[in-house]
Image (cartoon, rainbow, N blue to C red):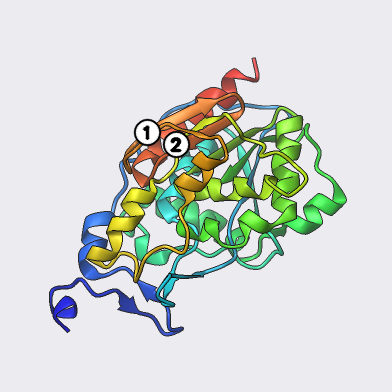
């Protein structure tokens, strides 16, 4: 009761899950992003498509059994997309089975006109995405795609790490000089490439990832309704990843064909780095 009075109690949603507390929302979200529009020279020709690999799962079970209402973080999804769109890249939204992509609407920057405009433009695609399973079955054409983008949000830790279609797409991108972009908890999808009979695709890579140490602290302010079921950054470190950051900051990192960002604070910088990298690779 005291936590509720102080605004520290997570909010109970209609489906029994919990979204962040009032205090957590004030501390960790904003009505506007730090996105600044950049005038890029638009790319043309082939390889202008970006495959946005989103999660279709919403509820993450904490160690205490409570469900966290998650999905794709809107800032981490849409701000990098804004930069890519302004540079002439196009998007194909996909989820593993073609079910709607889940957006963490409690984190949506309602007063950010740029984010709102892009979301409105692609809302139907988020609600009716391509089936990644079907896309893999039918075959991907490397001449169409510039990159695969895995947005952040804790929802990326649900389903994607075990999905063999996700593994197929990431291996395909790696083998065909197609860039992979991800942010925050998005690199959880990379775990799909580590199976009993295959070495982790990104062993030895340097990447920016949301730190487990920060996830461990957020239940205190009611961001999460309990402790995380498992830790992403330490899992990746154990597989040979070199972590580029120790804080939930604006760190971005490029290693070979992989471009990553640490947290929502890195979304704008990640978008700029992605455009710079993808466009430079075309020349």
- How many angstroms separate mark 2 from mark 1 (CA)? 7 Å
Left or right? Give the position of 217 relative to 187. Answer: left
| 126 over 113 or under it: above or below | below
Number of the label disc, if any, that sits on residue 122: none
Find residue 227 and report its image quarter: bottom left
What is the residue that sits farthest to the right in this orientation?
Answer: 138
Marks 2 & 1, CB-CB < 8 Å contact: yes
What is the residue that sits farthest to the top in this orientation?
Answer: 283
Q: Residue at x 23, y 64 (%)?
A: 221
> How many marks are shown on the rendered structure?
2
Q: Nearer the viewer, residue 56 or 282?
A: 56
| 37 over 110 or under it: above or below | above
Left or right? Give the position of 219 relative to 89. Answer: left
Residue 219 location (% of width, % of height) = 29, 65
Quadrant for the N terminus, please.
Answer: bottom left
> Crowdedness of circle 2 by 10 Å Cα count: few (<14), some, many (20+)?
many
Q: Secondary structure at mark 1?
A: loop
Q: Secondary structure at mark 2?
A: loop
Upstream in sequence: badge 2 or badge 1: 2
Q: Nearer the viewer, residue 83 or 203?
A: 203
Q: Residue at x 43, y 70 (%)?
A: 62
Residue 2 visible in this rendered orientation of the protein: yes
Residue 155 location (% of width, % of height) = 51, 61
Q: Residue at x 39, y 37 (%)?
A: 268
> Crowdedness of circle 1 by 10 Å Cα count: few (<14), some, many (20+)?
many
Report the residue marked by disc 2.
208
Residue 243 location (% of width, % of height) = 44, 34
| 125 over 77 or under it: above or below | below
Left or right? Give the position of 211 relative to 280. Answer: left
Q: Nearer the viewer, residue 203 or 117?
A: 203
Report the residue marked by disc 1.
251
């Amino acid at each position: 009761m005291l936590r509720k009075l102080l605004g520290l109690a997570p909010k109970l949603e209609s489906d029994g899950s919990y979204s962040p507390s009032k205090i957590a929302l004030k501390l960790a979200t904003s009505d506007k992003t730090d996105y600044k529009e950049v005038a890029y020279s638009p790319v043309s020709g082939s390889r202008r498509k970006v495959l946005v690999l989103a999660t279709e799962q919403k509820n993450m079970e904490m160690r205490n059994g409570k469900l966290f209402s998650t999905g794709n973080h809107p800032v981490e999804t849409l701000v990098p997309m804004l930069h890519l769109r302004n540079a002439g890249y196009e998007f194909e939204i996909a989820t593993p089975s073609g079910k709607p992509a889940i957006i963490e609407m409690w984190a949506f920057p309602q007063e950010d006109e740029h984010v709102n405009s892009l979301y409105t433009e692609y809302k139907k695609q988020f609600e009716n995405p391509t089936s990644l399973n079907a896309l893999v079955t039918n075959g991907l054409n490397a001449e169409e795609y510039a990159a695969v983008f895995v947005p952040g949000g804790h929802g990326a830790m649900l389903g994607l790490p075990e999905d063999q279609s996700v593994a197929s797409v990431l291996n395909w991108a790696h083998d065909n000089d197609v860039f992979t972009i991800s942010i925050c908890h998005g690199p959880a999808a990379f775990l799909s490439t580590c199976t009993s009979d295959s070495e982790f695709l990104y062993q030895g890579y340097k990447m920016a990832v949301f730190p487990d140490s920060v996830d461990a602290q957020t239940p205190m302010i009611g961001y999460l309704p309990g402790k995380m079921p498992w830790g992403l950054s330490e899992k990746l470190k154990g597989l040979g990843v070199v972590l580029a950051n120790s804080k939930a900051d604006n760190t971005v990192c490029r290693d070979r064909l992989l471009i990553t960002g640490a947290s929502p604070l890195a979304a704008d910088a990640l978008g700029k780095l992605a455009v710079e990298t993808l466009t430079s690779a075309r020349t």
